[in-house]
Image (tube, rainbow, N blue to C red):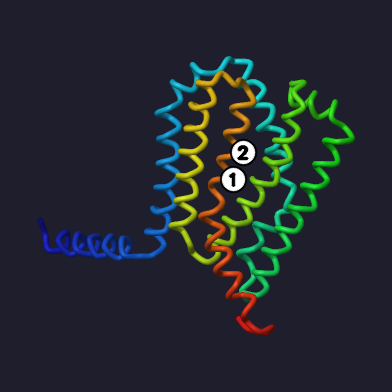
Amino acid sequence: MTPAGIARGAEVRMALAGLWRSSFLRNVLLVMSGSAIAQAVGLTLCPVISRLFAPADFGVFGSFSAATGVVLAVVTLDYAQAVMLPKRREEAGQMFLLSCLVTLGMTVLCLLACVLLPGRLLGLLRSQNHWLLVFFVLAVLAGDLNACFQAWCVRVRAFKHTSASQVVRGVASNGLHVAFGSLHTGAIGLIVSSVWADVLASPNLLRVVWTELRGFLAVPAGGS
């Protein structure tokens, strides 16, 4: 190898070593590892879950997921995504609290819609099981609060907690699918599993949020 080639090889190795030491790469790999583990659990249990539920059950679950997905996209009015934008800590905290309050308000509106227009909503969900409306409201509340918590954890670089939350959601969702499928609960089992997965994924994030917000509330107005 020529001296020029040796020099270029040394430069490449130094660049790769610097990239490996960078906190950005470590954080990306940390978050990706949580997603990868969650996906691996789902793929491993997929053949089992597909045999525990009928195609009609997956159809109802798909309609439920699509309906809640549309609502989740607008419930927080994207305030959760704006939590990472402010430079000052107290402004970010105010944005986070606003996103949580908007989530609670929109959840109440979803509850009123379920009470006043149950027939239309059940038609969209392709089911006549009124319990689905209860879980619809819970799914909206749990899903968007989880999104708010994740946004705050990303802002404060609590990537270990976000990664762990993804693993908890994946394991809980698929594990509950198997458990409810073994009990022959049908579509309601798939839906309850999905809602509980979001609920169980939130406490790990909530610890970070609570610790940070207590510090935020202790900072006098005008602090950073």
Three-letter amino acid code at the position of disc 1 = Val
Write down the residue under mark 1. Answer: 199
Residue 170: percent from left, percent from top: 48, 39
- Residue at the outermost front position: 183
Residue occupying the point 53% across, 63% down: 208
Compared to residue 87, the image places residue 180 above or below, namely above
Residue 200 lies left or right of residue 188; in this view the side is left
**Closer-to-camera residue (83/10):** 83
- Where's residue 5, x and y in %? 16, 59
Q: Quadrant of residue 117?
A: top right
What residue is disc 2 on?
Answer: 195
Q: Nearer the viewer, residue 100 or 73?
A: 100
Image quarter hosting the C terminus: bottom right
Secondary element under disc 1, as helix, strand or loop, is helix
Tell me residue 134's x, y (percent).
Answer: 74, 35
Q: Is residue 3 left or right of residue 145?
A: left
Q: Position of residue 173 (x, y in %)?
A: 52, 35
Decide if residue 159 is on the left or right side of residue 149: left
The span from disc 2 to disc 1 (Cα, nearest Å) is 6 Å
